[in-house]
Image: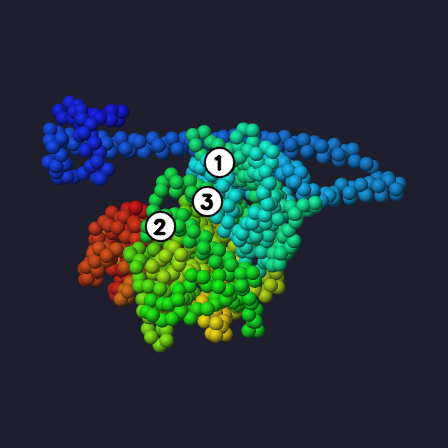
Amino acid sequence: MMAVTSSCKDKLGMDSGKYVRYTPEQVEALERVYHECPKPSSLRRQQLIRECPILSNIEPKQIKVWFQNRRCREKQRKESSRLQAVNRKLTAMNKLLMEENDRLQKQVSQLVYENSFFRQQTQTAALPTTDNNSCESVVTSGQHNLTPQRPPRDASPAGLLSLAEETLTEFLSKATGTAVEWVQMPGMKPGPDSIGIIAISHGCSGVASRACGLVGLEPTRVAEILKDRPSWFRDCRAVDVLNVMSTGTGGTIELLYMQLYAPTTLAPARDFWLMRYTSVMEDGSLVVCERSLNNTQNGPSMPPVQSFVRADILPSGYLIRPCEGGGSIIHIVDHMDLEPWSVPEVLRPLYESSMLLSQRTTMAALRHLRQISQEISHPTVTGWGRRPAALRALGQRLSKGFNEAVNGFTDEGWSMLETDGMDDVTILVNSSPSKLMGANLSYANGFPSMSSAVLCAKASMLLQNVPPAILLRFLREHRSEWADSGIDAYSAAAVKSGPCSIPVTRTGGFGGQIILPLAHTIEHEEFMEVIRLESIGHYQDDMMMPGDIFLLQLCNGVDENAVGACAELMFAPIDASFADDAPLLPSGFRIIPLDSKAVSILAICSLELQVFSQSSVNLFLKSMQDASSPNRTLDLASTLEAGSRPTGDYSKNSGCTKSVMTIAFQFAFEIHLQENIAAMARQYVRSIISSVQRVALALSPSRIGSLPGLRSPPGTPEAQTLARWICQSYRFFLGVDLLKSVSGGSESILKEIWDHSDALMCCSLQQLPVFTFANEAGLDMLETTLVALQDITLEKIFDDNGRKALFSELPQIMQQGFACLQGGICLSSMGRPISYERAVAWKVLNEEEDAHCICFMFINWSFV
């Protein structure tokens, strides 16, 4: 077939080597059909000729060629647009890298000069002298030079303008100069697919972070978004603009008061008294810079506020330059002194970590800009007809509600209840109308709403040797391990207002929960989802109220490779109608990594926080001993979990072995039941803490290795036995060897199964089969871990058609010993569709030739 040039828009099909030229009316008719169906079938093309008289003189073959060429032109157009976008991005990144190279060269020159200067100073230092007056003079002079006293700044309008220009100069020297020694953020290598060039400070006062990147928004729009800090910075409680001044050069000076939430219950919140200066430079760049005004006179001031520690923002801001071809090149600098002296020593790494500042502030701003840019360029409608902006608003509400619960500010109506003799769990109560605004007055079945107040139970604990991402992923995937279904039902009753109206599709889940994904942000492991807890009934006034429970859930920080990232899991019960203005009472977990060098066991004990109790250790030891008992079902999970796979996963996180976890749960209740609800909440949070301790102990590789008898090498006799059974049964039923070479010992058989290229997984022979083992490829396919594997049932990974096909083959597997399954689609534990070319299932026999389990092998699988 001859190629048709894409430059001819009206040339189009051909027959017997001749081109056919279509009339504009014919092209218009074909275009209408193309937009409805780009690849019509033969019957559809014949129908088109019959229905459109203007196409009656065109043969079906020519119509087919026209659609082929039209699809080719569309594909070329999209590819051209993609390549142009990549080219623009590479050009901008190249410009940024060249500027960064120039800055580094200047920094090297400055360091060389300083090194030479210090050498000269050392050589010409004053010789020791016996003259007491001279010696005293030298010492006194040195002391004055080391501790200069800067006079209070003049905060009058003229003084503020002078201070603004000084702030601009200092900010630019950090953004593009050498005022701060910047080092590349670990794990953030610049490139065309990266978020940008990320750096953190080295050796300067306070903590500082810098980011350079390209966003597809105009500079004025970028500045507008970034100045609205609460819209993208979830740690920001409020920003009040108290005064605005115009400068003679067209800029503006604003006086701001800003409050930040505390990330944990163990530290006070921060506030800032700021000046923000916005101006346009001679080259057209837009600059927004700011600094604290704590040391000013002759002008407005901000007295200290109760429950807040006044912190400083050193010259920081945004340099926004227009980019050729559209968009902006942005430089972000965040430089703060968060007053770490005000928190216990064990928590000071939270306020001394430039990496944490970069993850939660600097990179958050850049991600938010890129997210909005993508939404504008590719508008979409996500979960249940909601646009990304609506889902972002829900995420903001979840985060803000959780932060309010963790901080419990008195000006929001929170008051603390007395303890029950133990101070591990703090109980707060809020009965203010604003907290209950939007609560429903009646339930779906006509029961009166008795909620007149909100109670919050919160606690913090320190964890060791457990990566936050691993622990949070387990909490998300295994809610049944720590949550109480009765309390979930009680919490859901406060927001239940109507019958189920969500069109639920079974897309994956764990145990009794179904995960319904809503949205996933770009370049960031954050996603929002609806959790459906199935078939949970609860009682109200001695009457049963059956039905599923729905939770709106926000999860972020599950990327194990992100250095210094905070992991959060926040959720709130929602009514099945899922209205945008539905009342939300968020609860959840926040895990923040700590610098391991700054934390000691003594410091942990001195805070009187929850640590691994002896009872929890004994319980875990007993469960592990039971698992290794010969009376239990034989599987490879415990052996390999203590072996190669966790070690590989955790090695990435070896730089952070300690973290602080904050837990907060909120409950709506009737005020006269306060005492009972408080006792229930205390007990519930304590049970969650105990569950988290057991999970953390089980997930901690160093902890498992330090307990005698818990860690076994991969080649234990039980593991080798199951590996041998799998291979022998495959050869017995199918007549061929599963492995290329089976001449080695049992240990080599186990290793070859683990490294097999196809996904191998075993499931039990129970009424509801669950997975008991998977090799490395199988775990990748299911997107899970060996710890989480045993909570995934066989039916969960198939859709309705797949389940029907599988259950129809099970009798053949049990009678004949094996079955070959046709290719199809299955689902990972995260709900992602997976295609496989074919699958083989066979019965695994033990030494007595009794059926032990069923093994599945999925061949040539890939994510769709």
**Distance between mark 1 and mark 2 Cα atoms:** 28 Å
CB-based contact (under 8 Å), mark 1 and mark 2:
no
Q: Which residue is mark 3?
A: 368
**Distance between mark 1 and mark 3 Cα atoms:** 15 Å
In the picture, measured across the screen, residue 25 lies left or right of residue 784, that is: left
In the picture, measured across the screen, residue 234 lies left or right of residue 812, that is: right
- Nearer the observer, disc 1 or disc 3? 1
Please name the residue shown 19% across and 33% down the image: 30
Please name the residue shown 61% across and 43% down the image: 275
Earlier residue among tags 1 and 3? 1
Q: Position of residue 122 (x, y in %)?
A: 75, 35
- Nearer the observer, disc 3 or disc 2? 2
CB-based contact (under 8 Å), mark 3 and mark 2:
no
Q: Nearer the viewer, residue 537 or 274?
A: 274
Q: Nearer the viewer, residue 859 or 398?
A: 398
Q: Position of residue 802 (x, y in %)?
A: 23, 55
Q: Which residue is mark 2?
A: 386
Residue type pointed to by label 2: Arg
**Distance between mark 3 and mark 2 Cα atoms:** 18 Å
Q: Is residue 311 visible?
A: yes
Earlier residue among tags 3 and 2? 3
In the picture, measured across the screen, residue 454 lies left or right of residue 732, that is: right
Q: Is residue 108 above or below residue 362?
A: above
Count how many numbered circles sit on residues in the image: 3
Residue type pointed to by label 1: Pro
Q: Which residue is mark 1?
A: 219
